[in-house]
Amino acid sequence: MSAVRYRTGYKYSLWDTYRIRVRIRGYTVRHRLFELDADGLLTIFEDYPWDGASGPTIDTQSSIRGSLVHDALYEMIRLELLPKSARALADEELRDTCKADGMWPWRANLWFDMVRRLGGAYAALGDEVILTAP
């Protein structure tokens, strides 16, 4: 019998592959979880795990898609597949996608302000902890 390796910290798993055009252009990213073409077409593959909204807030229908796109873009930055300078555009995608999905503008703008102030730590390269059981 072999051990099970797993990660914690995820609430959601994408049911189907999802595509959206984002404002990050000029980069080509190929990864087992997602792709980004030079024209800004972001593809996030089925089973992509993400944790929804972070911080002292709650997930709502208006935040799910924005958090998915934002988490995938931040993961690309953490993996150094995108430059750190792409973070500002990723944050704008979060705000604008949430607004498009019906989030109150004041709430979307507050989220934008918070990720601009505090999001750098989440976009920073870090060592992921892989757990093993038993």
Image (cartoon, rainbow, N blue to C red):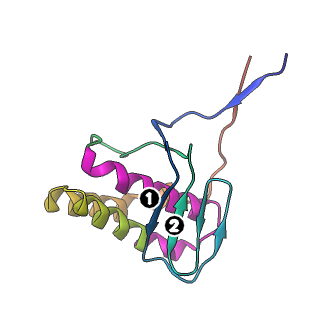
Distance from disc 2 to disc 1, alpha carbons, whole Å, reads 8 Å
Question: Which residue does the image show at 67% across and 48% down from the upper left?
Answer: 127
Q: x, y percentage for residue 98?
A: 27, 58
The residue depicted at 48 percent of the width and 77 percent of the height is 24
Report x, y in % for residue 8: 56, 33
Residue marked by disc 1: 69
Nearer the observer, disc 2 or disc 1?
Answer: 2
Q: Is residue 129 left or right of residue 3?
A: left
Q: Main secondary structure of the magenta part?
A: helix
Q: Quadrant of the N terminus?
A: top right
Q: Which residue is mark 2?
A: 42
The magenta region covers 61-88
Q: Position of residue 106 (x, y in %)?
A: 14, 60
Q: Quadrant of the C terminus?
A: top right
The numbered mark, 2 or 1, whose residue comes first in the sequence reads 2
Label at residue 38: none
